[in-house]
Amino acid sequence: MVAAGTGTKTRPRTGTPVGLALVRDAEVLGAEPFFHEFIAGMERILVPLGVPVLLQVVATVGQASDRMRAWAAQGQVRGVILIDLLPGDERVALVGELGMPAVVIGDPVTAGGLPAVWTQDEVAMRDVVAALVAGGHTHLGHVAGPAEMAHTIIRRRTFHAVASERGVRTTTFDGDYSEGAGVRAVTALAGTDDRPTALVFDNDVMALGALHEARRLGLRVPSDLSLVAWDDSALCQLAEPPLSAVSHDVQALGELVGETVAEILAGAAPRVITAAPATLVVRGSSI
């Protein structure tokens, strides 16, 4: 790896980690099981190779880029994992400038030729919308993650496209992955006469907030309002009623990413790996 500003090569020490500078609110991350399982899966592959995962939570993409520059300058990491990229994300060009090995978790279109692992969000969203329409819903809502993220754009675009193909109406709410975002979405629609009868959430925490708020407002789930979470978790399974969810094995995804990171660190050529798409698990929160 090239040490920033020096032009000299630094050989990674044994035990030098790969870095993940994650743009998240720390409170939201604490409540979100996805990344705990994801990192556990990566470390199952990488730690036996002497490569731990260094997680740094930051508030903005700019701070993530600054962290990556500091890691490179100080030889603190031997590579990075990029996730939740934006279209034209500055971090893609930055890893090239730094000479830093990198693996993208997301749509290969955003990866700029870097190795990528993609979970086919558009396939999963198409299946969710089709299942809800088959259940008799004619007005669907999508409570999305941060609007600027590439995978949010893909999910939202697919949601509207498939709903249009099926002849049903849509309403979109902007969320931030927090429980409060789910609460706000249900509060907003509860006062409208022509409201969605089913909501799809971009994570489990927002869906759980919506479930609690629906109960507080006297909305019956699923007879008055169906709820579907993205990324199944124990939170979904232990809720009452249990939340229907878009499900994949998150630790297995982490293992796949870990294997890809190991390949790149060993000098393999970049490639795109298409993971199996998530599938809808129907539970008591949806009809």
Image: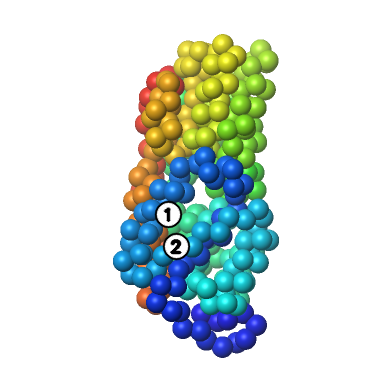
Q: Residue furthest bottom?
A: 8
The residue that appears at 62% across and 72% down in the rendered structure is 69
Query: Badge 1 is on which residue?
Result: 39
| Location of the C terminus (image quadrant) | top left
Residue 67 lies left or right of residue 230; in this view the side is right
* Residue 18 x/y as whole percent: 47, 67
For residue 33, above or below residue 140: below
Q: CA distance from mark 1 to mark 2?
A: 7 Å
* Residue 257 x/y as whole percent: 40, 59
Asked whether disc 1 touches disc 2, contact meaning CB atoms under 8 Å apart, the reply is: yes
For residue 49, above or below residue 132: below
Residue placed most toward the observer, 200 or 66:
66
Residue placed most toward the observer, 76 or 103:
76
Q: Residue furthest left?
A: 48
In the picture, residue 118 is in which quadrant?
bottom left
The first of marks 1 and 2 along the sequence is 1
What element does badge 2 sit on?
Answer: strand
Query: Badge 2 is on which residue?
Result: 53
The residue that appears at 51% across and 80% down in the rendered structure is 1
Residue placed most toward the observer, 74 or 187:
74
Residue 15 visible in the displayed image: yes
Question: What mark, if any, has residue 121 been given in the picture?
Answer: none
Dot 1, how many residues are within 10 Å of its Cα: few (below 14), some (14-19), or many (20+)?
many
The residue that appears at 67% across and 55% down in the rendered structure is 60
In the picture, residue 235 is in which quadrant?
top left
